[in-house]
Image: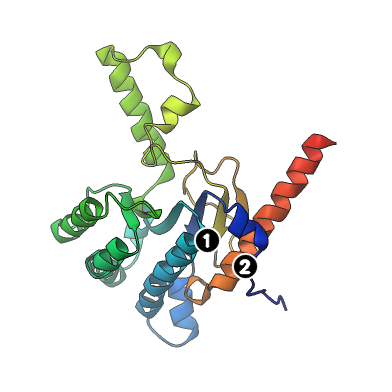
Amino acid sequence: MVIFETKIPKEILSNPPKHVGIICDGNGRWGKKRGLPRTAGHEIGMRVAKDITYACAEVGVKFVTMFAFSTENWKRSKDEVNFLMKLFVRFFREWRQEAIKKGIRVNHIGLLDGLSEELKKEIKLTQVETLNNSNIVFNVALNYSGRTEIIAAARDIAKQLKEGTMDINDIDNQVFSSSLFTANQPDLDILIRTGNENRISNFLLWQSSNALLCSLPILWPDFRRKHLWKSFQGYYDNKSKREFSRES
C-alpha cells in the first residue's frame, strides 16, 4: 500500500510547476463501485476540481487544465450526457463569484458548437467576468479534442498564409503554439491522470510533448491534495534526474 505524504514538498513552494494538466478519470466507476449512479461520481468530481484548483493556486501554479468532457464523450448515454451538460451550467454559474474573489481566471478550451445556448452563455459570462484575474488560469477542457485543436491551428495558419499576413518561413513552434486554444500559455510540466490508465486520450497532444505523465490508481472523486503533492514530488524527482543526466 502506498502511503501519501500530506506535507507539501519544499520544491513546490520555491519553484512550483507552471502548468499542470489533469485528466479527471473515474467519476462513473466511482459511483458504480458504491452502488450509486454514474452521475454521483460526476457531482463529487466537480467539487474535487474546485479544491485542486485552489490548491494549485495556493502554491503558485499559474495554469491548470482539466479534461472535463471530450468530443468522444457524446457517445455516452443520453441521460448521462444531459446530466453533465446541466452540471457544467451549474459549475460555471455557481463558481463564478468565488473564482472572482480568489483571483482565478476561468477559461474554456474546446468547441462551443454542440453545446446548449444556456451553457455557452454561462461560459462566456464567466470568461468575461474573470478575465482580469491573475492568481491562476483554470482551463476547462469541455467538448475538447487534441487532434481537433491541432487541425484548427493548422487552418488558422493556412488562412493567414492565404491572406498574405504570414510568410511560410515564419512558421515555427512558437507561431504554431499561438494558434492553439492555449495560446500564450506555457506547455505542460506535468500531466496527471487518475483512474489507473496510462493513455493521454487525445488531450493536449502538442502541449504535453515534454510533460511528465503521472498515472494514479485512484479515481478522480478520491483525488486529494496529498495526491497532488505526491505527483509534484514525482515531477521534481524526474526533473532532477534529467538535469543530472545532462550535466554528466
Looking at the image, which residue is at 48% across and 78% down?
Answer: 30
Looking at the image, which residue is at 23% across and 57% down?
Answer: 126
On-image quarter of the C terminus:
top right
Q: What is the crowding at mark 1: few (fewer than 14 residues within 10 Å), some, or many (at least 20)? A: some
Residue identifier under label 1: 59
Residue identifier under label 2: 8
Task: Estimate the x, y position of residue 237 in percent, counting from the top left.
Answer: 72, 54
Residue 152 vertical position relative to residue 87 in the rendered view, above or below: above
Q: Secondary structure at mark 1?
A: helix
Q: Nearer the viewer, residue 38 or 211?
A: 211
Q: Nearer the viewer, residue 197 or 171?
A: 171
What is the quadrant of residue 153 in the picture? Answer: top left
Check contact, mark 1 vs mark 2: CB within 8 A: yes
225 left or right, relative to 83: right
Q: What's under tag 1, amino acid-wise? A: Val
On-image quarter of the N terminus:
bottom right
Task: Estimate the x, y position of residue 42 in percent, counting from the top left.
Answer: 38, 73
Task: Estimate the x, y position of residue 232 in percent, counting from the top left.
Answer: 62, 59
Looking at the image, which residue is at 15% across and 60% down?
Answer: 118
Q: What's under tag 2, amino acid-wise? A: Ile
Q: Secondary structure at mark 2?
A: loop
Q: Residue furthest front?
A: 14
Residue 179 vertical position relative to residue 123 in the rendered view, above or below: above
